[in-house]
Image (cartoon, helix red, strand yellow):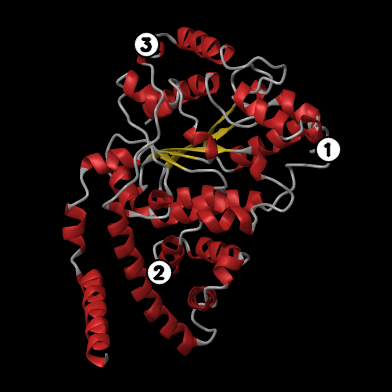
């Protein structure tokens, strides 16, 4: 029994040692360009919580990534990924985002990729519903949080020191971060410039570096087996060799086949609302106000880290479904205050942006209650072309 137990322990130790010390370069050699291409549309946590696959995508000279949340997986023929393929655009794109991702998770991701963002053109889609009174909560933060990115931040000495401290201070608001005693100790040590618990802090930094290297190794192993991409629902004939006006007409016809209610919500999504008792959504947002939220500070972190990295971002301010928000009791004039504030934030930050807020009541611009699609993609595709053509 003792010998068997010792043998099992020895085998486990040998496997762990092999896992840790297997050369990274050999693992990377197993990850093909086809694997990377597949990862561009799967929007799996294995991609956005890791670093290696994104690094490969960003290093492609003609890539222009899109960052956002759940709208990115609304694939239809007009989706930017399908658009660039159908039109042989001089750039390609990939998507980083899913439901629940907001500014602070994107900040961590950008921070981990700063060295690959220099002069890189990126697109960042801003969702109004992020800017609630309480901002991002643990419910959305935890499943989208990347421990690898958070540990990487502790060792990022190239980032502006004040920006890094602001980010660490904000991250310590979340229980997911505070429960990690090693990470919390490193952050507190870094925020105090090494003055708080210097011996404990230095020991934590040594242990943290080893843990970060293990997380990087784990990311590489996961990258060998990427998930399949989303079904693209492509239809090149609606896009290829079509003018902007023709694409809009096709998108409108595409939407007309899928919407038959007064709220301009895709019928399948509308039916889910009906099944959930439609009347309960009446005036549900009458007390909401998107002009006062901690999300603005998180969003400023995104703007600042992209500037710190030397990236060339295009920010996209998208609207909500005006018909639906009227029913929810969030009136147009109050929504306009949010759009105005967002525009002022972008102007004050001196960044490139496009404001689609005047499309609130534009049929088929929003596919359901909040997600851009169909005609919205057509308008965005044109903005991507223009952004790419800028020096």
Please state which of residues 203 and 228 is positioned toward the viewer in this rendering.
Answer: 228
Above or below, comparing residue 183 to residue 316 in the picture: below
Q: How many marks?
A: 3
Which of the 4 image quarters holds residue 99?
A: top right
Above or below, comparing residue 177 to residue 352 in the picture: below
Looking at marks 3 and 2 on the same chain, the residue that comes earlier in the sequence is marked by 2
Residue situated furthest bottom in the rendering: 2
Q: Which mark is residue 286?
A: 1
Please state which of residues 305 and 175 is positioned toward the viewer in this rendering.
Answer: 175
- Quadrant for the N terminus, please: bottom left
Q: What residue sits 65% from the left and 56% below the top? A: 137
Q: Label 3 belongs to which residue?
A: 237
Do labels 3 and 2 touch, CB within 8 Å?
A: no
Q: Label 2 belongs to which residue?
A: 155
Looking at marks 1 and 3 on the same chain, the residue that comes earlier in the sequence is marked by 3
Mark 3: secondary structure: helix
| Residue 266 visible at all | no
Which of the 4 image quarters holds residue 34?
A: top left
Q: Using residue 147 as the reference point, say whether residue 344 is left or right of it.
A: right
Q: Using residue 12 as the reference point, say whether residue 234 is left or right of it.
A: right
């Amino acid at each position: 029994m003792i010998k068997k137990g010792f043998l099992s322990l020895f085998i486990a130790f040998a496997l762990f040692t092999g896992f840790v010390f297997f050369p990274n370069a050999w693992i990377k050699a197993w990850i093909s360009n086809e694997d990377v291409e597949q990862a561009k549309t799967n929007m799996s946590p294995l991609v956005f919580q890791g670093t290696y696959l994104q690094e490969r995508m960003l290093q492609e000279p003609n890539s222009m990534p899109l960052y956002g949340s759940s709208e990115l997986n609304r694939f239809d023929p007009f989706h930017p990924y399908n658009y660039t393929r159908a039109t042989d655009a001089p750039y390609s794109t990939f998507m980083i985002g899913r439901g629940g991702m907001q500014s602070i998770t994107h900040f961590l991701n950008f921070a981990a990729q700063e060295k690959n963002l220099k002069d890189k053109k990126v697109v960042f889609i801003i969702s109004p519903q992020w800017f609630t009174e309480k901002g991002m909560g643990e419910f959305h933060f935890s499943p989208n949080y990347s421990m690898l990115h958070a540990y990487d931040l502790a060792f990022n000495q190239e980032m502006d020191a004040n920006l890094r401290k602001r980010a660490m201070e904000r991250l310590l608001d979340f229980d997911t971060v505070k429960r990690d005693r090693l990470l919390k100790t490193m952050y507190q040590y870094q925020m105090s410039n090494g003055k708080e618990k210097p011996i404990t802090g230095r020991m934590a930094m040594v242990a943290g570096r080893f843990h970060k290297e293990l997380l990087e190794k784990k990311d590489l192993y996961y990258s060998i087996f990427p998930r399949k991409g989303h079904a693209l629902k492509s239809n090149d004939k609606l896009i290829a060799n079509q003018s902007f006006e023709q694409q809009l007409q096709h998108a409108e016809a595409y939407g007309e086949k899928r919407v038959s209610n007064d709220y301009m919500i895709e019928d399948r999504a509308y039916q889910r609302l009906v099944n959930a008792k439609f009347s309960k959504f009446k005036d549900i947002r009458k007390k909401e106000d998107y002009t006062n939220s901690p999300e603005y500070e998180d969003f400023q972190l995104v703007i600042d880290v992209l500037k710190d990295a030397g990236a060339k971002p295009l920010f996209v301010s998208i609207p909500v479904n005006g018909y639906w928000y009227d029913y929810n009791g969030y009136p147009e004039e109050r929504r306009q205050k949010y759009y105005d504030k967002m525009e002022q934030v972008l102007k004050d930050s001196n960044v490139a942006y496009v404001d689609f807020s005047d499309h609130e009541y534009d049929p088929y611009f929003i596919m359901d209650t909040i997600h851009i699609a169909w005609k919205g993609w057509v308008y965005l595709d044109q903005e991507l072309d223009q952004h790419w053509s800028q020096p």
